[in-house]
Image (cartoon, grey):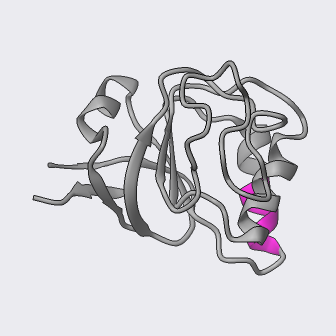
Amino acid sequence: MSAVAEILVPGSGGEGLALVLTAPISFWGGVDPKSGRIADVRHPQHGETISGRVLFLPGTIGSSSASAVLMELVHNGHAPTALVLHEPDAILLLGLIVAREVGWRTPVALRLRRDAFEAYRGKRVSVAADGALTTAA
């Protein structure tokens, strides 16, 4: 299976096991920047790690601190391999832009229709820097 998603923020391609979140998440307080684990005990995927995963986000719960948390994840080596969003979140994506500006290797951020997310659940996904997503056969 393959698709080409719209690039929101250029970055490094990569691969990893898909983590398709079933609910929106707040990065501030919802994700531990030191471990990459979902820390929000109310989130359905509490305890899962986003580190090294292709993270599919159905939405985010806004906080102006989300960009700082994402920057910390990048700096600490616990960022997702790629972020796939249904709708862009300018505050969250600012974290990738600033991290890239200071010279850190950042994951690519993409936009993909929400109804396409389920096809990737539990699969190993490769994400190219040009926005191509492919799953292992």
Residue drawn at 55 percent across, 22 percent down: 44
Residue 82 horizontal side relative to residue 95, left or right? left
* Residue 129 visible in rendering: no
SS assignment for the magenta stretch, majority: helix
Residue 22: % across, % down: 47, 23
Quick one: which residue is furthest to the left in this view? 137
93 versus 60 height, above or below: below
Quick one: which residue is furthest to the bottom in this view? 103
Q: The C terminus lies in which quarter of the figure?
A: bottom left
Q: Nearer the viewer, residue 130 or 107?
A: 107
Residue 96: % across, % down: 72, 58
Residue drawn at 59 percent across, 25 percent down: 59
Residue 53: % across, % down: 48, 55
Residue 33: % across, % down: 78, 54
Asked if the magenta segment contains residue 1, the reply would be: no
84 versus 89 height, above or below: below
Q: Where does the magenta region start and end? A: 95-101
* Residue 137 visible in rendering: yes
